[in-house]
Amino acid sequence: MSIYDSFDAWTGLALPHEIWAAALATLFLFAMGFAMRSQLAAANGGILPDEGVTLRNGIELIVEQLVNLAKDTMGDEYRTWFPVCASIFFFVLISNIMGLIPGLGGSTSSINVTLAWGIISFIAYNAAGIRKHGWWYINQFLGPGFFEFEMFGRHWHARVLAPVFLVLEVPLHFARIATLGIRLLANMFADHVVVMVWIGLVPAIVPAIFMGLGLMVAVLQAFVFSLLTMIYIGLALEEAH
């Protein structure tokens, strides 16, 4: 029996389990954010790190690494789009870890949730491109320019293969939604199944090994999803030639 069955019984809503799981992950992230905010708002908060291994130190370390990665992949405008990428990372990470806990389950085992994040990533990087280049962002889909010419006081790139590239590039960009969502779903579903099978067969010791491996997979998949989003945004911000 899942904890979400109890939620259904308490509320009478009978919501799909992935909605409960997503709401629980979001609630946890808000609670974690408020806890961090209260620590930083305290006297001398944020000036010195905590002593020992604490939640704040762990989060600050993760954020610092993500910021460095964002600078490398998105360039000078990383501050604008970093919140989206970091939100993806932490939500996917928490959801993946929830999926390793028996009786709980995470939302990233649902194709609806993983594709929803794929759509968010798709919207984010296209919004970044349009915001930076305006409607000239369409040049991203028209292939390379073979030579330049000047007309109406502006330099133009002759994209003679534009009809071919447009037919190819547009579907490939939409396919990124599916590749992001299905990659995350497949990896986490397989990982959770393996853990649950071993818990059923050997209740002690052996499942702990696979749960440790599952934790590594959870972190890796959250990292890959956010990294790909950063890369897509970085590519969208580049000037098409």
Image: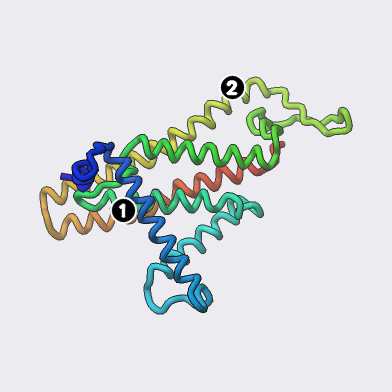
Q: Is residue 43 above or below residue 177?
A: below
The C terminus, quarter of image: top right
Residue in front for this viewpoint, 231 or 20: 20
User: In this figure, which residue is indicated by the disc labeled 2?
Assistant: 167
Which residue shows up at 49% across the image and 53% down it?
A: 86
Q: Disc 2 and disc 1: Cα gap in Å?
A: 40 Å
User: In this figure, which residue is indicated by the disc labeled 1?
Assistant: 97
Q: What element carries label 2?
A: helix
- Discs 2/1, front: 1
> Residue 124, image x and y in percent?
55, 41
Q: Is residue 113 left or right of residue 209?
A: right
Q: Can residue 193 be seen in this view?
A: no
Amino acid marked by disc 1: Ile
The local crowd at label 2, few if under 14, some if 14 to 19, many if 20 or more residues have their Cα within 10 Å, is few
> Residue 152, image x and y in percent?
88, 28
Q: Is residue 50 above or below residue 2?
A: below
The N terminus, quarter of image: top left
> Residue 146, image x and y in percent?
75, 30
In the drawing, what numbered circle is on residue 15?
A: none
Which residue shows up at 52% across the image and 49% down it?
A: 84
Residues under numbered marks 2 and 1 in contact, where contact means CB atoms less than 8 Å apart: no
> Residue 163, image x and y in percent?
65, 20
Answer with mark 2 or mark 1, whichever residue precedes in sequence.
1
Q: Is residue 103 left or right of residue 133?
A: left
Quarter of the figure with residue 59: bottom left
Amino acid marked by disc 2: Val
Q: Is residue 145 left or right of residue 99?
A: right
Q: Which colour scheme is used?
A: rainbow
Q: Is residue 124 left or right of residue 17?
A: right
Q: Is mark 1 on a helix, strand or loop?
A: helix
**Looking at this rendering, what residue extends furthest in the front direction?**
11
Q: Is residue 190 visible?
A: yes
